Structure formats: structure tokens, C-alpha cells
Image: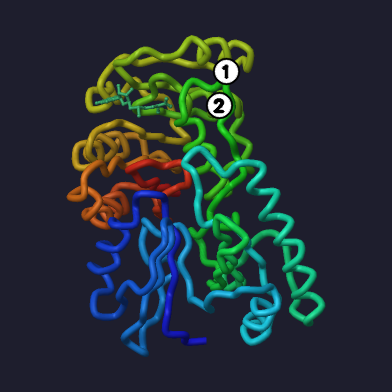
Amino acid sequence: MNAPFRFTTCRAGSEAALKRDIARHFGGKLSPAFMKPQFITWKVHDPAFRTPPSLSPFARVSGTSLGLCKTIDELVDFACHLATKPVRLHVFPRLTPEDGVSAADWQRIDTLAAKITQALQQAGVQCTTRLPYVDGDLILDVIVGETEAEPLFAGWHTHQAGLHTEPGGLPRITLPDEVPSRAWLKLEQALAWRGWDKLNLRGQTALDLGSAPGGATFSLLSRGMNVIGVDTGEMDARVFRLAETQAAVFEHWRVAAGKIDLPSLPQVDLLLCDINLAPNQVLPMIERIQRHAHVPRLILTLKLNTPALEDQACHFIEAARHIAPAPVFATQLAGNRREICVCAG
Ligand SMILES: C[S@@+](CC[C@H](N)C(=O)[O-])C[C@H]1O[C@@H](n2cnc3c(N)ncnc32)[C@H](O)[C@@H]1O
């Protein structure tokens, strides 16, 4: 299975950051081979190269390339050579708008996925949808282009902790009209990525740094959490109304996160940060709070608004590892813009 090409998918606009990140970490071992929007393949130059679970925080999915397939039969042929154990079939679109893949596009993909599943089963390849995912599960990735004329791309990877379980890292969550901001979407995607959407958070307390106008707080209150929102900006009135209907507590602390009065903090179960400052300004604020509060779960959105900041992504993730509980994972969520999501705990 030591094929000479790897593949990565990424957010629209992160291709250059991904290329630089991989050059920095795997220069001489991998070089870009084939590129389409949100998709890059890599030639492997070192036969001993062992693919890490994720090639880069900018790669939403990465794995070993099987190649392009014009027909489902070709795809099945690849899979027959690959699979000695049941495969999880992940069929997903190459192009992924930041506010989510449309229902019509998912319908097209799902119809295709059903046909592929049937063809695989007829060829004797076992497909599984068993839950939960466990490390080592074999995933057959099928990436679908914009039109039926574009060949399918096939690749595979093995599941490891911290990788997405939704095909393509694309949970089917769409932004409702009634939420105060698209930070709601990013938080819901982060919770789904870590499986924390299944936790019963009711009655627990979240500290939301950079909380205004309140999309993330809205998501937390909907889950029955009590929330302290820290922001000098205004919170949307819908946040206060939701707290009332949920019989949850929402407090707005109108201070800069670096100035929080630490002794006033209650026990905090979840720390969120979406402050629009560079990570080297934000991480020390989080370290100060963590030293005092020892929060067991963190979800940090690190803003990487310039190439120089993007190029330090791994440095910031490493810095987060020093201040946050293990395990620490980082990814660029489907809803992220020039930022990455770091989850810890
Ligand atoms: C991207 S917005 C946050 C969106 C928010 N998470 C939501 O759910 O709607 C960034 C926020 O960070 C806030 N901010 C900037 N510097 C801050 C600081 N030092 N402490 C707290 N908040 C800060 C800004 O006022 C702004 O509201």
C-alpha cells in the first residue's frame, strides 16, 4: 500500500498555506503534483516516508492516493486491491462553500455513494458504518468534482484520534437564520469534530472569550450551559432571551480577556476563545486563565490573518499544548475562514 502519491483536501483559499506548511515539514519528501481548488496531491520522494495521521492542520483530509476513476467499476477495482478488511466509504465534494454544502449537492453525492456502496458489495468488498470509529479503521475517500464529467478521485486513510469522522470533515450542519453570528456554525462543527456534541453539557459552565455578538454563546445556551461571555462589545438581544427560555444563566463581563478578575471565576467546564487578535496576543491570556482555572476542555479559534501567522500555525498549536489539557488537536474546520480550530481535553 506504499503508493507514491498522497492527497490533501482543504478550505477554499488555504491551498497556498497548505503548500507552504507541507514544504516546511516534509520538504524533500513530498512535492506538489496535481492541484485543483481545495485539493492537492503530493509525490512521495522518500520510499520510507510514513504518512502521519494528518499532513497539516490546513489539510482537512489527508491520505494515500489511489488515483482518478472515470467509472464506478474503476473505483471498485481500486478498492478490491486495497481492502482486506471492511471499509468505511466517505464520498464528499471537492468544493465546499464556507457556509456549508447545499442540500442539492449532498443529494447528488448521496445518490452516488449509494451506487458505489452497492457496486463494492457486489464485488465482495465489505462496507461498514459501525459506530464509534476506532483507530485503524480503513476509510475509502471518494472525492467528487463539480460536474459528472470530472473523474472521481479515490484515496484512503486510516482513522486516528483527532481526525474527522464525517466524510470530508464536513458535518451536515447549516447556519440557521435565528442565530446571532456564524460563530455558531464554527462551534457546532468543532463540537461535532470532537464528538462533544453528544455530551450532556446541561448545567455546566462555559467561559466564552470574545463572545460578541453571540453565535457561540447561543449554541452553548441552547445546550443548557450557563455562560460567561467576555467582550467589550455588545451582545445580541437574542442571547439574553434564549438564556431566559432555557432557564440558564448568562453573564456579560464587559472587560478585555486579559483583565478578567480571576478570583471571580466560578468553576469553568469549557473555555472558548474567538478573540480577533493574533494568537501570540491571545495565548498568553488563555495561559493566565488556565493557570488559575484548570479548565478541562478548550475550543480555541486561532486567527491566522496573514501568511506570516499561517506559517506559525504549528508553533501556536505547540504553544497551546503547553497550556491546555491533553489531547490537543488542530484542524481547519469547514466553516473556518483564515483561522484554525484547536480543541484540547
Ligand atoms: C470574531 S468576533 C467573536 C464572535 C463571537 N465568538 C460570536 O460568537 O459571535 C471577535 C470578538 O473578539 C472581541 N475582542 C477583541 N479583543 C478582545 C479582548 N482583548 N478581550 C475580549 N474580547 C475581545 C471583539 O470585540 C469581537 O467581538
Label pair 2/1, CB-CB below 8 angstroms: yes
Q: Position of residue 112 (x, y in %)?
A: 71, 61
Q: Where is mark 2, residue-wise?
A: 225
Amino acid type at image mark 2: Met
Q: Secondary structure at mark 1?
A: loop
Q: Residue at x 40, y 28 (%)?
A: 208
Under 8 Å from ligand 1: the CB of mark 2?
no
**Which quadrant contains ligand 1?**
top left
Amino acid type at image mark 1: Ala
Q: Nearer the viewer, residue 95 or 82?
A: 95
In the shown orientation, is residue 182 left or right of residue 106? left
Q: Is residue 42 above or below residue 231?
A: below
In the shown orientation, is residue 113 left or right of residue 31? right
What's the colour scheme? rainbow
Q: Is residue 237 above or below residue 144?
A: above
Task: Choose top left, top right, bottom left or bottom right for residue 223.
Answer: top right
Q: Residue at x 36, y 90 (%)?
A: 47
Q: Is residue 344 above or below residue 272?
A: below
Task: Count residues near mark 2 (Cα–Cα under 10 Å), then give few for <14, some for 14-19, many for 20+.
Answer: many
* Number of numbered discs: 2
Q: Position of residue 39 (x, y in %)?
A: 43, 62
